[in-house]
């Protein structure tokens, strides 16, 4: 018999894995979890402004994904679909936080140990942006990340954050000015 | 934060009457249609360049965040896998005859998809993807079509692989179910190398043929 290599699930494309997972194949789902956890954690940490709740949010996102995978019409877009889910879960967390403590725009910053890693890149432009984002009011940070990192439209952001589009535009305008000021000063 | 942050060099007076929000929308639209009053304004060009730097940097930031993520904790993965239920993918119930009239035996659609997947995976160089059963599977004898998505290892003959996939699936379903399978359609959506070698994607090659 021919001894061709057996294709491994680890190397399989997203469409194959998401299709199998939608049909109930847990091993394929596990490969997707391993493949996209780092991205989803990094993203959730940015949206949340700290990594205290990142693990919970990403776990919840994957559990929701498993339940809803069979509704995903095109399994090849599973990556952006997962990013939408983790966006939504992160936003839900922030909302829940606000219900607990009625704090204004300047929410309590997480202790330094739990902010995104800032060690090695201390002198880079990326570090400057990282700091500027963390120092911004939560609403500005969220809008900026949804717009510039996740590629959401104004309408999408308004829907996700439950805000009027005009408010989103205003918040983004302020975020943009804040960041340009920080980054141009740094230059 | 106040609503009206003054930003030197980025106010309408510096931008030949344009605002930074206008410029942002212009940038988002890919600088189309070309606006000569923006493109010929040195102030606008400086602002656009700053915004482009910021955008590039924002995207790079997430990439570096990802690179800095610690290796995914096994307990984290286990936490997810232990929390997922199997009802979500069970699907419809498929009756199986039993000698006793009192017994009612069914297979779940999920279990049948599992059989199909396992059968297809036995074909050399093949990984089965999504699998769909079309037709009234709950009614014995109804004509059923099987649709499977597959990726095939680089170097395999696609028509041959598709034929083997159909044979393997047909034999397996005949052995374990009473479904009246009329067609098995195989769509080869990807020809894969190892991911580490880069993905060679030969999109949507239809390995279509029918079993009678």
Image: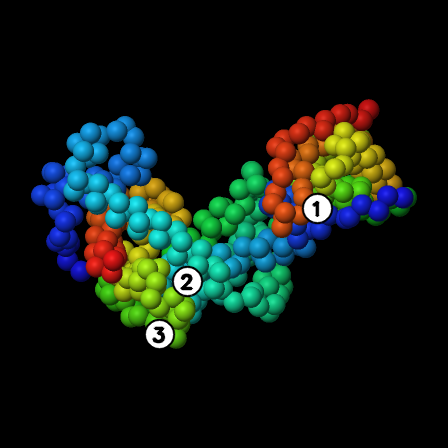
**Relative horizontal placement of residue B110, taking residue A166 as reference (left or right):** right
**Whole-number angstrom distance, CA of label 1 to CA of label 2:** 36 Å
Q: Are marks 3 and 2 in contact (CB under 8 Å)?
A: no
Q: Which residue is mark 3?
A: A112
Rendered residue at 84%/41% (across/down): B172
Q: Toward the viewer: B94 or A119?
A: A119
Rendered residue at 32%/35% (across/down): B30
Q: Which residue is mark 2?
A: A45
Secondary structure, mark 3, is helix
Rendered residue at 16%/48% (across/down): B10
Q: Quadrant of residue A135?
A: bottom left
**Whole-number angstrom distance, CA of label 1 to CA of label 3:** 48 Å
Q: Residue A96: give x, y in percent of width and height.
A: 37, 62
Q: Which residue is mark 1?
A: B110
Identify the image quadrant of the N terminus of chain B. Answer: bottom left
Residues at marks 1 and 3, common chain? Answer: no
**Whole-number angstrom distance, CA of label 3 to CA of label 2:** 14 Å
Q: Are marks 1 and 3 in contact (CB under 8 Å)?
A: no
**Relative horizontal placement of residue B193, taking residue A90 as reference (left or right):** right
One can see residue A50 in this view: no
Q: Residue A66: give x, y in percent of width and height.
A: 58, 52
Residues at marks 3 and 2, common chain? Answer: yes
Q: Which chain letter matches label 1?
A: B
Q: Which chain letter matches label 3?
A: A
One can see residue A125 in this view: yes
């Amino acid at each position: 018999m021919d001894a061709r290599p057996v294709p491994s699930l680890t190397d399989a494309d997203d469409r194959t894995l998401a299709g199998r997972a939608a049909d109930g194949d847990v091993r394929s789902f596990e490969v997707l979890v391993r493949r996209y956890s780092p991205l989803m954690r990094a993203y959730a940490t940015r949206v949340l402004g700290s990594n205290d709740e990142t693990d919970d949010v990403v776990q919840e996102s994957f559990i929701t994904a498993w339940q809803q995978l069979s509704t995903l019409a095109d399994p090849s877009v599973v990556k952006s679909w997962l990013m939408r889910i983790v966006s939504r879960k992160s936003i839900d967390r922030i909302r829940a936080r606000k219900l607990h403590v009625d704090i204004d725009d300047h929410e309590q910053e997480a202790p330094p140990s739990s902010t995104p890693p800032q060690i090695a890149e201390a002198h880079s432009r990326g570090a400057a942006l990282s700091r500027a984002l963390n120092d911004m009011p939560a609403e500005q940070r969220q809008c900026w990340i949804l717009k510039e990192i996740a590629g959401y439209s104004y309408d999408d952001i308004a829907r996700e954050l439950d805000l009027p589009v005009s408010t989103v535009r205003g918040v983004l305008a302020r975020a943009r000015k804040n960041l340009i000021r920080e980054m141009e000063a740094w230059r | 934060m106040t609503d009206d942050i003054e930003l030197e060099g980025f106010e309408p007076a510096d931008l030949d009457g344009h605002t930074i929000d206008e410029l942002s929308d212009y940038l988002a639209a890919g600088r189309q249609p070309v606006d000569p009053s923006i493109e010929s304004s040195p102030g606008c060009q400086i602002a656009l360049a700053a915004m482009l730097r910021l955008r590039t940097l924002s995207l790079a930031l997430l990439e570096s965040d990802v690179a800095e993520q610690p290796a995914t904790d096994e307990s984290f993965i286990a936490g997810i896998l232990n929390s997922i239920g199997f009802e979500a993918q069970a699907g419809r119930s498929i009756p199986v005859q039993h000698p006793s009239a009192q017994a009612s035996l069914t297979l779940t659609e999920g279990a049948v998809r599992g059989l199909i997947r396992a059968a297809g995976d036995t074909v050399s160089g093949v990984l089965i993807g999504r699998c769909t059963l079309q037709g009234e599977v709950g009614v014995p004898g109804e004509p059923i079509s099987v649709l499977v998505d597959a990726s095939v290892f680089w170097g395999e003959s696609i028509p041959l692989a598709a034929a083997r996939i159909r044979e393997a699936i047909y034999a397996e379903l005949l052995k374990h179910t009473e479904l009246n399978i009329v067609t098995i359609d195989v769509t080869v959506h990807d020809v894969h190398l190892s991911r580490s070698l880069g993905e060679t994607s030969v999109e949507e090659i239809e390995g279509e043929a029918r079993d009678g």
